[in-house]
């Protein structure tokens, strides 16, 4: 059962922290074969390595958002993502939300701080992509 209650910024940040820990574990296993093959040539300044990790992150979020509406962190914090119409999130919405969230995060978190002044408590990336986070369960 979903609720129209606004998701507080602190809950969003806790969910992000949880998903970040999961992504670190995924990165560990996803990069292990690359490190074994490339060795020391695989560094933090390698643009291909950065794009590889960014692609893994994109796949993680877009897959979960479009297949059930919850990442593992969102399940833990009882949050789900829906379109503004209350339907499942489309791939286009998930991709735009991901790109806009990265942009908002890179601008000192401006896209997330937006939720503090938005009339519906939405982040900027949710407002633009036509998505919203809702509480699910009890």
Image (spheres, rainbow, N blue to C red):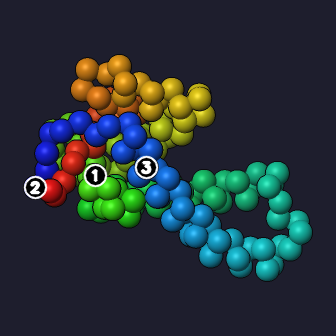
Task: Say what secondary structure mark 3 lies in.
Answer: helix
Q: Earlier in the sequence, mark 3 or mark 2?
A: 2
Q: Nearer the viewer, mark 3 or mark 2?
A: 3
Q: Where is residue 99 in the image (x, y as percent from the top left)?
A: 50, 40
- As measured in the structure, the alpha-carbon distance from the residue carrying label 1 to the one carrying label 2 is 11 Å
Q: Label 1 belongs to which residue?
A: 79
Q: Measured from the top left, where is residue 126 in percent x and y? A: 34, 35
Please give the label number shown on residue 27: none
**Residue 49: % across, % down:** 73, 59
Q: Name the residue under label 2.
A: 1
Q: Is residue 126 left or right of residue 105?
A: left
- Is residue 64 something that shows in the picture? no
Q: Do the residues labelled 1 and 3 touch (CB within 8 Å)?
A: no
User: Dot 1, how many residues are within 10 Å of its Cα: few (below 14), some (14-19), or many (20+)?
Assistant: many
Q: Given the current orientation, which residue lies at the most extreme left position? A: 1
Pick the residue in front: 10 or 40.
10
Figure quadrant of the N terminus = bottom left
Query: How many marks overall?
Result: 3
| x 60%, y 53%: residue | 54
Q: Which label lies toward us, 1 or 3?
A: 3
The numbered mark, 1 or 2, whose residue comes first in the sequence reads: 2
Badge 3, how many Cα within 10 Å: few under 14, some, many 20+? some
Q: Is residue 46 positioned above or below 42 on the image?
A: above
Residue 129 occupies quadrant: top left
Q: Residue 31 or 47: which is nearer the viewer?
A: 31
Q: Residue at x 40, y 40 (%)?
A: 10
Report the residue marked by disc 3.
Answer: 14
């Amino acid at each position: 059962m979903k609720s129209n209650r606004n998701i507080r910024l602190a809950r969003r940040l806790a969910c992000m922290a949880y998903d970040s820990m999961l992504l670190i574990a995924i990165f560990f296993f996803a990069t292990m074969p690359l490190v074994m093959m490339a060795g020391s040539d695989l560094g933090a300044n390698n643009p291909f390595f950065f794009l590889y990790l960014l692609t893994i992150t994109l796949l993680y979020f877009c897959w979960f958002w479009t297949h059930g509406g919850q990442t593992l962190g969102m399940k833990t914090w009882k949050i789900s993502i829906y379109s503004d119409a209350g339907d499942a999130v489309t791939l286009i919405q998930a991709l735009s939300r991901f790109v806009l969230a990265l942009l908002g995060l890179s601008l000192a978190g401006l896209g997330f701080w937006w939720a503090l002044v938005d009339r519906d408590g939405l982040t900027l990336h949710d407002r633009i992509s036509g998505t919203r986070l809702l509480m699910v369960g009890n």
